[in-house]
């Protein structure tokens, strides 16, 4: 059984001093010019941090950022996340330029009650994603209580959320994960039909298992983003210079075949907007899916696709959405994603949105709209895996 943070005693038995709590958070947030451009995940981590501080604890935070492939890279530093957290909490944050060095561990051991210490990017070490036992052991030296509040990585078996758990007698989930489980478990038990899954983004391989599972659960699966290009190739369409995973064409063919067998509708874009000659050229154009020029980059769905997608959305009762349907960070190619937002909200559907890019796109369009979705999950992959009936490895480890 998962232990909730509210059941944990944060006071040391032989002293009035608070214990040191090591919290796995998810600060994998977008950064431009060394500034956080979307702080949603940081904001959602604050209730757990404040709860621990209110109990008199000392707090050590650890997270990953991006995919630095085991090498120190300033592009993926957590310094901007720490600065944003300090701004939001209005308290200073201690920061260590490493996560397992003796200096970093000493900072954690010498924290005073109410102080916060943020460690540098866990993925500067390959040992993190390898779930290395020695790496887990070093991380565990930062605290006497372990709390996992990183729902976005709960579907991964990594050192900081899986291997580390065996080093703590007192461990549990934070308020964010508790909230995610409570809502998603309720919706999983009896989703209102028709259920439509909207999948976007670039890569099929990270979402194959989810799509396969939802072939039995969903009535409709809308596919957008660069992922749709791979499916179009599977149907012998030409996609010009657009991004696609050509080594996954057979995977897409098999998914289309299985969907047909099971009576699930897979809906692909039928037209696009994009650019000619090169990505970022500014030479914007439009084309039907059957007539894409050889020199075109498809970067958003067109008006016909918008009408097709939004009609399906409006006839649904439940929407699960992970991944934008265009290059939404560019206003020229955020139109399709924005119209999907409008359609979900206008029809007052049960709506579950997951994934950092999707949440950022909604907030960029109109930050006030984020509260109108039924549930905004901080973890796209974890959210979809849980809704598809899978267990989340990091949470299973907390039960042992």
Image (tube, grey):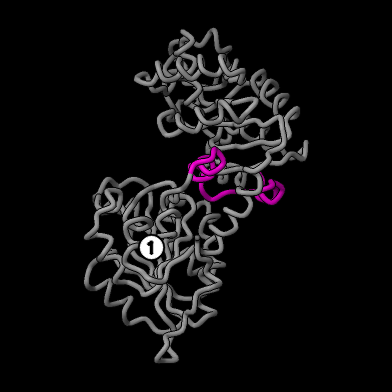
Q: Where is residue 285 in the image (x, y as percent from the top left)?
A: 55, 18
283, above or below 192, in the image: above
Residue tagged 1: 62
282 with respect to 160 (left or right): right
Q: Quadrant of the C terminus?
A: bottom left
Residue 243, quarter of the rendered image = top left
- Left or right of 199 on screen, residue 100: left
**Nearest to the observer: residue 163 or residue 84:** 163
Tell me if residue 141 comes above or below residue 176 in the rendering.
below
Q: Outermost residue toward the bottom?
A: 15
Task: Give x and y (percent) for residue 316.
Answer: 72, 30
Residue 184 versus residue 97 in the image, above or below: above
Picture layout, residue 358 above or below residue 267: below
Q: x and y percent of residue 2 in the render?
A: 50, 61
The residue at the point 60 percent across, 43 percent down is 353
* Residue in view at x 47 percent, y 50 percent: 152
Q: Is residue 153 visible?
A: yes
- At mark 1, the secondary structure is strand
| Residue shown at the point (59%, 23%) measured from the top left | 301
Q: Is residue 342 visible in this depiction of the protein?
A: no
Q: Is the magenta stretch mostly helix, strand or loop?
A: helix
Q: Tell me the residue at 52%/80% (across/down).
A: 55
How many numbered dots are placed on residues in this image? Answer: 1
Asked whether residue 367 is drawn in magenta, I would say yes
Residue 279 sits inside the magenta stretch: no
Give the image location of residue 245, x and y in percent.
38, 23
Q: Is residue 126 left or right of residue 377?
A: left
User: Mark 1: few, some, or many residues within 10 Å (few <14, many ≥20)?
Assistant: many
Magenta stretch bounds: 365-390
């Amino acid at each position: 059984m998962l232990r909730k943070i509210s059941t944990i005693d944060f006071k040391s038995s032989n002293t009035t001093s608070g214990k040191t709590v090591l919290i796995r958070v998810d600060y994998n947030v977008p950064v431009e010019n060394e500034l956080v451009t979307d702080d949603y995940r940081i904001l959602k981590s604050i209730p757990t941090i404040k709860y621990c501080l209110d109990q008199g604890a000392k707090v050590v935070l650890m997270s990953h950022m991006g995919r630095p492939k085991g090498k120190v890279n300033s592009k993926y530093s957590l310094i901007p996340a720490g600065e944003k957290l300090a701004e939001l909490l209005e308290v200073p944050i201690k920061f260590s330029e490493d996560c397992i060095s003796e200096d970093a561990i000493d900072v954690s051991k010498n924290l005073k009650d109410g102080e916060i210490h943020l460690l540098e990017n866990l993925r500067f070490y390959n040992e993190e994603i390898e779930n290395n036992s020695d790496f887990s052991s070093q991380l565990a030296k930062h605290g006497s209580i372990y709390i996992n509040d990183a729902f976005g990585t709960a579907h991964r078996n990594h050192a900081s959320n899986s291997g580390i758990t065996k080093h703590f007698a007192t461990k549990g989930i934070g308020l964010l994960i508790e909230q995610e489980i409570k809502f998603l478990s309720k919706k999983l038990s009896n989703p209102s039909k028709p259920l439509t899954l909207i999948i976007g983004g670039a890569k099929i391989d990270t979402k194959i298992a989810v799509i396969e599972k939802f072939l039995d659960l969903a009535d409709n699966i809308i596919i957008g983003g660069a992922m749709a290009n791979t499916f179009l190739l599977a149907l012998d369409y030409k996609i010009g210079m657009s991004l696609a995973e050509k080594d996954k064409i057979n995977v897409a063919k098999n998914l289309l075949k299985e969907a047909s067998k099971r009576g699930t509708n897979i809906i692909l874009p039928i037209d696009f907007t994009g650019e000619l000659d090169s990505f970022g050229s500014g030479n914007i154009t439009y084309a039907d899916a059957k007539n894409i020029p050889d020199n075109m980059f498809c970067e958003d769905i067109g008006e016909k696709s918008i009408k097709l997608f939004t009609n399906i959305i409006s006839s649904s009762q439940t929407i699960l959405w992970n991944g934008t349907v265009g290059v939404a960070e560019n206003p020229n190619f955020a139109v399709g994603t924005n119209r999907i937002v409008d359609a979900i909200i206008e029809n007052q559907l049960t709506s579950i949105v997951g994934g950092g890019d999707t949440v950022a796109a909604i907030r960029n369009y109109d930050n006030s709209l984020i509260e109108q979705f039924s549930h905004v999950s901080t973890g796209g992959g974890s959210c979809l895996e849980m809704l598809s009936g899978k267990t989340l490895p990091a949470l299973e480890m907390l039960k042992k």
